[in-house]
Image: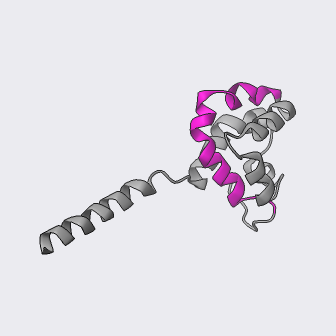
C-alpha cells in the first residue's frame, strides 16, 4: 500500500514539473519582441507594451491572436510576414505574456 501511494505521489510530482514548462514566460516574450518585432515596429518594448491595458491585450490575443495580427499588420506592414508566420504562432503565448506583464495599467516597466 505504501508503495502504491508513493508511486501515485511521484507521478503527480513528475506531471507537475512537466506541465510548468508549457506556461508562457514574459522574459521570453520580451526576447522575441526584441529579436523579431522591435526593428519593424520602431518601438522599444516599453513603448510597445504600454499601448494597451491588460484587458485590451487579452482581447487582442483571444483565440489565435487574429485581432492582434490584424491591428499590427495594418500599423506596421513590415511585421506582417512575421505575424502571419509559424514563428509568431509558436511565440505568441510568450509575447502575449510580455504584453500583459508590462501593459499600461500594470505598473511594470520592461528593461528594453
As drawn, the residue found furthest toward the front would be 1
Front in this rendered view, residue 42 or 8: 8
Q: Is residue 92 magenta?
A: yes
Looking at this view, is 25 or 2 the one in front?
2
Judged left or right of residue 68, residue 89 is left
User: Which quadrant would residue 67 be assigned to in this image?
Assistant: top right
Q: Residue at x 75, y 66 (%)?
A: 106
Query: Could you tell me which quadrant the N terminus lies in?
Result: bottom left
Q: Position of residue 84 (x, y in %)?
A: 69, 28
Where residue 76 appears, as percent x and y from the top left, is 83, 32
Q: Residue at x 19, y 70 (%)?
A: 6
Q: Would residue 93 be visible to someone looking at this image?
A: yes
Position in image of residue 13 (x %, y %): 31, 64
Instruction: Give the residues drawn in magenta, as a range.
Output: 77-104
Residue 16 vs residue 76, the one in the foreground: 16
In the image, taking residue 80 as reference, residue 26 lies left or right, namely left
Amino acid at each position: 500500500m505504501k508503495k502504491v501511494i508513493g508511486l501515485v505521489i511521484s507521478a503527480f510530482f513528475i506531471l507537475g514539473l512537466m506541465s510548468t514548462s508549457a506556461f508562457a514566460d514574459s522574459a521570453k516574450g520580451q526576447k522575441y519582441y526584441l529579436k523579431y518585432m522591435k526593428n519593424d515596429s520602431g518601438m522599444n518594448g516599453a513603448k510597445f507594451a504600454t499601448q494597451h491595458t491588460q484587458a485590451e491585450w487579452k482581447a487582442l490575443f483571444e483565440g489565435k491572436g487574429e485581432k492582434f495580427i490584424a491591428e499590427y499588420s495594418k500599423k506596421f506592414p513590415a511585421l506582417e510576414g512575421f505575424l502571419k508566420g509559424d514563428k509568431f504562432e509558436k511565440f505568441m503565448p510568450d509575447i502575449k505574456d510580455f504584453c500583459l506583464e508590462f501593459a499600461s495599467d500594470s505598473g511594470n516597466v520592461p528593461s528594453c
